[in-house]
Amino acid sequence: MSASEPMLHVEALHLSDAHWDILEDRWICFSTVPEIGGIDLSEISANVWLVLNRPYCRRDLRFYAISADEKVAELLETTKGAALSVIERTTWIENAPITTAKAITMPGYQLLTPDPRR
């Protein structure tokens, strides 16, 4: 963005089999999604609400690794310095950003995208 914009910062932990497996760190642009301020994100996740209410026309994806700092290690119940994968996604409506989200995964996390022709 070329100028400062008001944003909503959301951090969420995602469960799988009763264990934390993803820490979501998300920023949502109020100028593109002004109604997000009135949504109870304890009832519906920011991701689900955005998918249902703010379809995007393009997205950027980044995949990289980090070492868990003290805060991330505590939240994901792993050790400081553990190797973690990050999936970072920014979505847009034309040239206006909707959201940027980092999904920081537990050690050993796997994401499978099966071939739909199977």
Image (tube, rainbow, N blue to C red):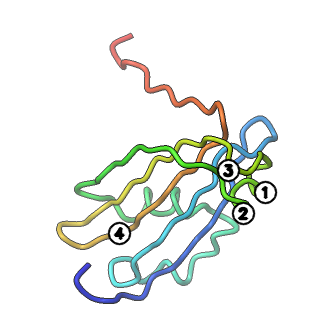
Between the residue at mark 3 and the residue at mark 4, the CA separation in whole angstroms equals: 21 Å
Does residue 27 sit above or below 51 in this rendering?
Answer: below
Which is more N-terminal, label 3 or label 2?
3
Few, some or many residues within 10 Å of mark 3 (<14, 14–19, 20+):
some
Q: Where is residue 69 in the image (x, y as percent from the top left)?
A: 67, 58
Name the quarter where the N terminus is drawn.
bottom left
Instruction: Give above or below for 63 relative to 13.
Output: above
Amino acid tagged 2: Lys
> x, y (%) of residue 64?
44, 44
Q: 61 or 117, which is in the foreground?
A: 61
Q: Mark 4 points at which residue?
A: 98
Which residue is at 56% across, 63% downward? 25
Give the farthest residue toward the left.
94
Looking at the rendered structure, the kind of residue marked 1 is Glu
Label disc, if present, on residue 74 of the rendered structure:
1
Which amino acid is tagged 3? His
Q: Is residue 97 left or right of residue 105?
A: left
> Does dot 4 land on a helix, a strand or a loop?
strand
Q: Are marks 4 and 2 in contact (CB under 8 Å)?
A: no
